[in-house]
Image (tube, rainbow, N blue to C red):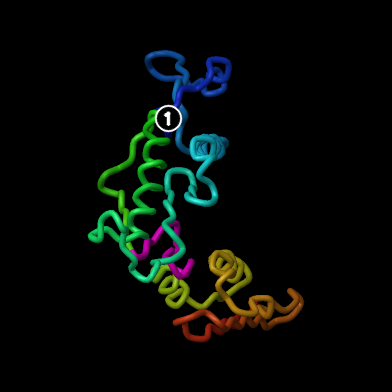
Amino acid sequence: MGGYDERELDVTTRPLTTFETPLGRMQLTRLPQGATNSVAVYQAQMTWILQEEIPESVGILINDGGIKGPRSLYNQETLPENPSIRRFIWEYAITLERVLFRIEEAGLTISGSKFACCVPALDIVGHVVSLKGRTISKQNINKIQNWPTPLNKKEIRVFIGLFGYVMMFIENSQKLNHHSEGSPEKMLTVTGIKNVKKISISSEE
């Protein structure tokens, strides 16, 4: 097991990676980053390793993942055996140890500098997750607010692609209207994003 440039490629598939060099013809022997199927292979590997933890205890996207804690703080209740340890922390620690063990058994490692546990909220894959659920990261909110006004169809499509990433958080997102392409005026109006001012974008062909 391993990630990019670590997981061994099957011998029968290596000829597909053949390339010419001054030293002669060579083939890749490890999973390359950027190849068509590399992401799917990596994701399938991580899903298989953590299959018994998904989706109850773990959410994983390639090499980024979150280990979920209890859905309640139990009113700060402590353990009967040790009043210095809160129940929700203990339950999380058990889950954390179990997940880390599965990763270690698979021969994988975790980046210490990127590892964060027992935090009240975590910014991961563009979202902020916490006990209250999932919200839009401040970075993405700022990106949308500061996005320049589209001036043509292509720029409108680019903005819609960006905005689609946060559609799930928008109340009544189906009200986002994009008039027919035959109209000289395009108007996109979106409301309902928490802590985000009303966004109104208009452009002419």
Image quadrant of residue 131?
bottom left
Image quadrant of residue 44?
top right
Label 1's element?
loop
Image quadrant of residue 195?
bottom left
Q: What's the residue at 56%, 82% (across, down)?
A: 192
Judged by its main secondary structure, the magenta piece is strand
For disc 1, the neighbor class at 10 Å (few under 14, some 14 to 19, many from 20) is some
133 falls in the magenta region: yes
For the residue marked with disc 1, what is the amino acid? Ala
Give how far across and how far down residue 204 sits, in percent.
Answer: 63, 81
Position of 77 relative to 95 (above/below)? below
Q: Is residue 143 left or right of residue 13?
A: left
Q: Quadrant of the C terminus?
A: bottom right
Q: Quadrant of the N terminus?
A: top left
Q: Is residue 183 left or right of residue 9?
A: right
180 falls in the magenta region: no
Q: What's the residue at 34%, 50% (across, down)?
A: 93
Give how far across and how far down residue 85 sits, in percent.
Answer: 27, 58
Look at mark 1 in the image and give the residue it sits on: 106
Q: Nearer the viewer, residue 5 or 182?
A: 5
Q: What's the residue at 55%, 75% (across, down)?
A: 150
Q: Which residues are magenta?
A: 120-136
Position of 120 relative to 181 (above/below)? above
Give how far across and how far down residue 156 sits, in percent.
Answer: 59, 71
Position of 51 relative to 79 (above/below)? above
Give how far across and how far down residue 37 sits, in percent.
Answer: 57, 35
